[in-house]
Image (cartoon, helix red, strand yellow):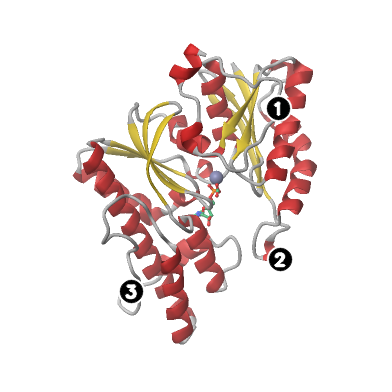
Amino acid sequence: MKILGIETSCDETGVAVYAENQGIVADQVYTQQLHQDYGGVVPELASRDHIRKLLPMVESVLQQARLKRTDLDGIAYTAGPGLVGALFVGAVFARTLGWALGVPTVGVHHMEGHLLAPLLEANKPSYPFLALLVSGGHTLLVQVESLGAYTVLGESIDDAVGEAFDKTAKLLGLGYPGGAKLAALAEQGSAGLFEFPRPMLDRPGLNFSFSGLKTAVNTAWQACKQDDAAKRDIAYAFQEAVVETLVKKCERAIMQTGMKYLVVAGGVSANLHLRQQLTHLLQSHQGEVYFPQPRYCTDNGAMIAYAGFCRLKQGQQDDLSLNVRPRWPLTDLQTLQNLRTA
Ligand code: KG4
Ligand code: ZN
């Protein structure tokens, strides 16, 4: 089976081909540049840029994979959550191409795509496992029994962790989206001058909250000299606070469930400090942590192609209606069990 994957939920156009027994055979991502002047993603501009990029990228990915359109056995696209217009561009493109080629299509949940990305690696976990999903739009701790069988153990009650990285980066004048730049700056900073709260660690449960941390950073920034040294040390203290919070919640989830495998995915899973600390944590619990390779941490078509493959292989496919879901709880997904009895 060869599956084309299309990701257009936000400001990345991602296109890839997953081939059964071979893995990802072609993969391209285009990050839209036109939002930089606005300090955030402008939905209508995002939709239009996906329209411009999608067809040439699909042609180019097929060439890279040395495949013809007619070699494809199915098409997967992100059906939600995300920006409604951007999702529609990918959905209409995928459905039309599927119709023309006479192959099935399947709408994929963006966060399931992230969640399954570590399974593209040679060393991958077996079910069941815990998943920490940390992106620009979501912060979720999930118990994963099997494909589609997800229990959300905890989530952010306000800002997502990537959003907190981006807002803090913007405050420090690092541009948008500045999460990766903030993380790089944090590597040069040191402890001592700034200390930020570890949100919600003093309360039971597995939920997160990051908006207070952002406010604490703002207060510290307004009160300090605002030079390069302060920027580095604030970045360091911010990253320490975020990573320690995430690690402690993962530890609680491990203790609560007794699970030994942890999958970490989404844009923030590229963060090196988070990777180090979670690796230590799982070692101390005689378990193992699994990350996607860096290019599959942020939004991409490969994870959508793979998630689509998993579902198409089990017989799931779209009916004749065309739907996207800008809001779509992960817990609403069909499990394999449901698919088999449907
Ligand atoms: O998964 P993703 O590409 O998009 C969403 O689904 O939201 O995640 C993007 C997020 C952004 O907030 C970005 O700043 C953050 O991931 N990010 C990072 C790093 N690389 C990307 N945050 C912290 N450290 C990084 N190295
Ligand atoms: Zn994402």
Does residue 78 appear to the left or right of 330 in the view shown? right
Tag 1: residue type? Leu
Residue 49 vertical placement versus 66 (above, below): below
Per the model, the C-alpha gap separating discs 1 and 3 is 50 Å
Q: Which mark is residue 62?
A: 1
Q: Which mark is residue 195?
A: 3
- Residue positioned 70% across, 33% down in the render: 91
Tag 3: residue type? Glu
Please tell me how many numbered marks the rendered image carries: 3
Does residue 208 appear to the left or right of 341 in the view shown? left
The answer to which of marks 1 and 3 sits earlier in the sequence is 1
Q: Determine the secondary structure under disc 3.
A: loop
- Residue positioned 70% across, 59% down in the render: 35
Tag 2: residue type? Asp
Residue 322 position by quadrant? top right
Q: State the image coordinates of residue 44 (x, y, percent, origin top left).
A: 76, 52
Q: Estimate how packed mark 1 is, as few (under 14), some (14 to 19) or many (20 or more) residues with alpha carbons within 10 Å.
A: many
Residue 28 vertical placement versus 181 (above, below): above
Closer to the eye: label 1 or 3:
3
Closer to the eye: label 2 or 1:
2
Q: State the image coordinates of residue 332 (x, y, percent, origin top left).
A: 50, 32
Per the model, the C-alpha gap separating discs 3 and 2 is 32 Å
Q: Which mark is residue 37?
A: 2
The answer to which of marks 2 and 1 sits earlier in the sequence is 2
Residue 66 position by quadrant? top right
Q: State the image coordinates of residue 55 (x, y, percent, origin top left).
A: 78, 35
- Residue positioned 40% across, 54% down in the render: 272
